[in-house]
Amino acid sequence: MAETMMASPVSPTIPFDQDGAHHGHLKVPHSHDGSAYGAVMVPVAVIKNGEGPTVLLTGGNHGDEYQGPLAMLRFISSVNIADVTGRIIVVPTMNQPAFAAGTRTSPIDKGNLNRSFPGRPNGTITEKIADYMARYMLPMADLVMDMHDGGKTLEFVPMACTHVLDDKDAEANGWQYAVAFKAPFTCKLVEIDTIGMWDTHVEESGTPFLTTELGGTGTTRPDWAEIAFRGVKNVLRQAGVLAGEVEDAPTQFLDIPLEGAYITSESDGLIEWVVALGDPITKGQVIARVHDPVHLGTQPRDYHATMDGILAMRHFPGIVRLGDAIAMQGAIS
């Protein structure tokens, strides 16, 4: 006899099936020294107007990534419900404990939410959030967009992304939304580690999915903010849940190959960039040097481009450690 999965202890404070704009929380029980019957309150909004598709927008999967939460907060506070047909569910800071702390992972259990799916209803706080999103939120969605940036340790050229899938119809379905986002770059992204990712779980469910990498460095910027806000509205328009036409903007298509796209540091040190983010690169050229600030007089270690294209992501800030990803390269397609 198959084991029955226990119910989630997480409970929403707002309805998902009633027309109107509803703002509340996903209440995650959390008993701790400061509050015996406490809870982690994950913000959620539901904007529903009649029948139509459901789009689930998620941000703050990592707590030090701010472009997605900012765009979603702007959207929630400005949307006219008369312009909505169907339902938009917004979870702008999915890993709320990490977002509150300004850290990639949760300060409660050190959980990396984007490596915790499908989660467990009786697991850690991070696993409980993952389980609720996977078993209760995802089945409501006809499309999921999870917005990321580089956080405090990376900086990307602003891009909307999908992944290469075995199911080419599903791949094309996700790709249309990535193109509609109208980021400066649109790419099919290869991830270094896909086990436990929200991306992977959504795609394996058969639900169309797209993501973003919009800058980073642990802050916001006017140009990134406008790209993200326009992109949210464009995706919702493409999905047919928000009135209006997709706002056009130039985009370049990038391919991130399965092999050789990432360059990893082989030493600790201070990085010297020889090329800037977004610059064209040629296979074999030096793109960065890592200097040893402790053993003076030591020659720096050079890092070379492994392909022709552009520098699509760089490490941030200036100090790197052995094993850090220094760069991601993309080929213009």
Image (cartoon, rainbow, N blue to C red):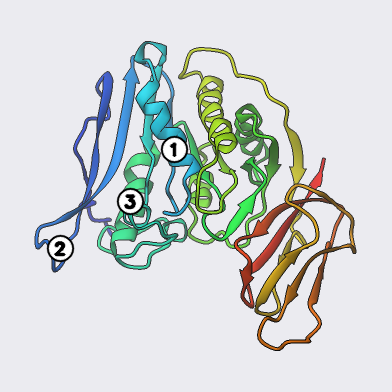
Badge 2 is on which residue? 31
Identify residue type, mark 2: Ser
How many marks on residues? 3
- Which quadrant of the figure has residue 301? bottom right
Residue 96 marker: 3
| Residue drawn at the location 41% of the way across and 15% of the way down | 85
Identify residue type, mark 3: Gln
| Residue drawn at the location 53% of the way across and 12% of the way down | 244
Where in the figure is residue 176, as x and y percent of width and height?
A: 64, 29
Farthest residue in the front direction? 296
Assign a secondary structure to mark 1: helix
Q: Of the residues under marks 3 and 1, which one precedes in the sequence?
A: 1
| Residue drawn at the location 37% of the way across and 15% of the way down | 80
Farthest residue in the left direction? 36
Disc 2 and disc 3: Cα gap in Å?
16 Å
Badge 1 is on which residue? 70
Q: Quadrant of the C terminus?
A: top right
Density class for disc 3 (Cα within 10 Å; few <14, some 14-19, many ≥20) is many
Identify residue type, mark 1: Leu
